[in-house]
Image (cartoon, helix red, strand yellow):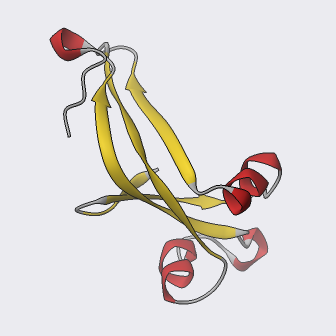
Amino acid sequence: MHVYDDGSLAYIEFVGKQHYQNLKSNSRVAVACIDFAGREGYRFVGDAELHESGEVYDKLSAPFPPERKPKAAVVIRVERVYALGGAQVGERIL
């Protein structure tokens, strides 16, 4: 998972099993990113866009060798962010 642009996160989907099938039928997602050692984290909520080919797919899959061809590039358009640690735990911060 990495920052794709000012309002989006992105990752490469290699496996294409149940999680991928779920995204194909319902684009709503929530992703938690946590730093356990630092005792902080965030939950990102939004819609996932699946890119199985094209410019976005090519850009995000470029670092991987051809023999590890991804099923898709997934871009999550973040709508809300919640704190998962610190004084604001559980609160919407964006």
Left or right of 58? Residue 44 is left
Q: Quadrant of residue 42?
A: top left
Left or right of 8? Residue 56 is right
| Residue 22 vertical placement versus 62 (above, below) | above
| Residue 8 vertical placement versus 90 (above, below) | below
Residue found 48% across the figure and 39% down from its top: 31
Q: Quadrant of residue 88?
A: top left
Q: Please tell me which residue lies in front, 28 or 61.
A: 28
Number of disc labels: 0
Tell which residue pokes out farthest to the right in this image. 17
Residue found 54% across the figure and 50% down from its top: 28
| Residue 22 vertical placement versus 77 (above, below) | above
Residue found 27% across the figure and 14% down from its top: 89
Location of residue 70 in the rendering, given as x and y in whole percent from the top left corner = 70, 69
Tell which residue pokes out farthest to the bottom in this image. 54
Location of residue 55 in the rendering, given as x and y in whole percent from the top left corner = 50, 88
Q: Please tell me which residue lies in front, 24 or 75.
A: 24
Location of residue 81 in the rendering, given as x and y in whole percent from the top left corner = 30, 38
Residue found 42% across the figure and 33% down from its top: 33
Q: Locate the C terminus by quadrant.
A: top left
